Image (spheres, coloured by chain):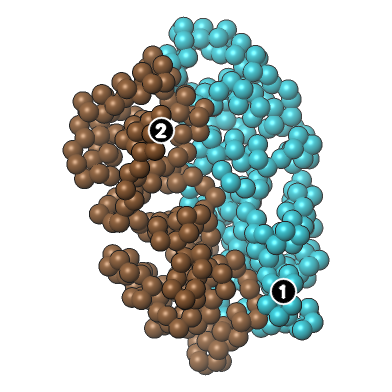
Amino acid sequence: MKPEQIQQIIKDYHHEIISDIPVAIIDMDYKIFEINQPALSIFNLKLENVLGKSLIALSDQRWQSKLRSILDECVFYNQDKSVLSLRFTRPSKYRLLLFKYTPVISKDSGNIVSIKIVASIPSFKINAYVIYKIISNAFTQTELKAELPNNNVITPQELEPAVLFLLNNDLDYNEIASLLTMVYCKKYTKHLIAKLVSRKLYEKFDVTNLMALKQKYRKSKLSRVIPKFILQEFSYPIESL
Amino acid sequence: MDNNSALNLIINYHKQIKDDIFYIICDLNYNVLVEDGSSAALANIEGKTFLGKKLVPELSKAIWRTQLVEKILKDCIASKMSSEWLSLRFSRQQEYWLIQLNYIPLMNFSTGEVVGIKVSASPIKYPLYLYPIESIITAGKGNYKLDEINNGEFLSSTEQEVLFLTYHTANYEEIAYLMSLAHNEVFNKTKISRINSKLLEKYECANIEELKVITYQKGLHIKFLVSLVGEFMFPVKTFNTTESK
């Protein structure tokens, strides 16, 4: 069976059979050839504006090269891929979504004929550990530079709450340093974090050890501050956490 | 298109196209009509096929599971809404003990009626502790559980459980409550305190904060011990897009 015929079967199926799950299907050139009503609703899209368009071109520019490599891997390894994505342009309920990219296979030839994309609201907690694992699994340093906006800098005022937040989530100095380095594309060392904690934070909180610092932090208003890097838009591929 | 033709379209489509890794399709009487070809073997289903079997009661042997799956399927048909469930079942191959199941109603566009249900499965990529621990333990309470095995490891099974719970809770009362819930026997604060003293000694820690850090560093905080839970099906969020329409 020719690829066009298979594509027609997929189109016909999705026109006649519907579900409440938001689904889009792209061809092997990554152009959208099928998208259902729930998906259009979530992304505030009009069918005529997306049908036949390249998914990559429609995506955020910063994300395009990574998206292409995810789709390439999905096809090359015949594997499904998941991406956790935060976008403030979506309706509030759907700002944080988990996208699953699954290869669609013709049973006749065994070939991948398209990719199905399904969106869902993540059902698991997103804590500092998850963010750390996702970011460190997801990107090389160069890729992160492309992913993150140029103005992604952290001020000294923002650094302290970020370090406290991560300390409170039991990340050690090394992990905090590598997470901040990845997110802000600036070198943070274990030594620098240790110095910040022992010289500045101990003094500010009037404590002499880490345990006391964490306890005082939990009782302070600062513990309600979520670091900026968690609140910025992102698209993180998820392997295993 | 009438509902019979729609059902035939679903069957024919899935005979030609595989658009999920693991899935089955059943009709409104829960007869399995189509399968992906590999999941029956992973689930250790007799004859290595779901075809010709009924999702309930045939494939859900425990009574609680039969009743729950039947309710999920009925709800799926009545509400026309999909639902997601975490499912722990020890009869599957070990890699697939814990999976996520999605029950998706397949509707005929012409009539708006549900004509079939797709059940897709995927191994979860996130540690189980990212879901509410108490709810997970409660969901498995009284169900089939694996025996506790102590392979002469550094920590006994109970110590491993208490260590995991110490990381995720605020005090001994909470740990005692969860341990009692999991094992159906009374664990009081004193008993937990005694176990924790042993843990402090074994890891040479001066206090609980230090113990928590070691738990994190060794990656033990993500290991939700199977001995804490019986088999379960736990609902995760339902994707409801009706509000945005």
Q: Which residue is at 59% across, 20% downward? A: A173
In-image side of B164 versus B240 (left or right): left
State the quadrant of the C terminus of chain A.
Answer: top right
For the residue marked with disc 1, what is the amino acid? Answer: Gly
Q: Chain of mark 2?
A: B
Label disc, if present, on residue B40 of the rendered structure: none
Of tags 1 and 2, which is closer to the observer? 2
Badge 1: residue crowd in 10 Å (few <14, some 14–19, many ≥20): few
Provide the residue designation for mark 2. Answer: B153
Residue nearer the viewer, A60 or A19: A19
Against A86, residue B13 (above or below) is below
Give residue B12's position: percent from left, percent from top: 60, 86
Vertical order, A201 against B85 (above or below): above
Chain A as rendered: colour: cyan
The residue at 62%/34% (across/down) is: A229
**Disc 1 and disc 2 in contact, CB within 8 angstroms:** no
Q: Secondary structure at mark 1?
A: loop
Label 2 packing within 10 angstroms: few (<14), some (14-19), many (20+):
few
Q: Nearer the viewer, residue B11 or B52?
A: B52
The residue beneath circle 1 is A110
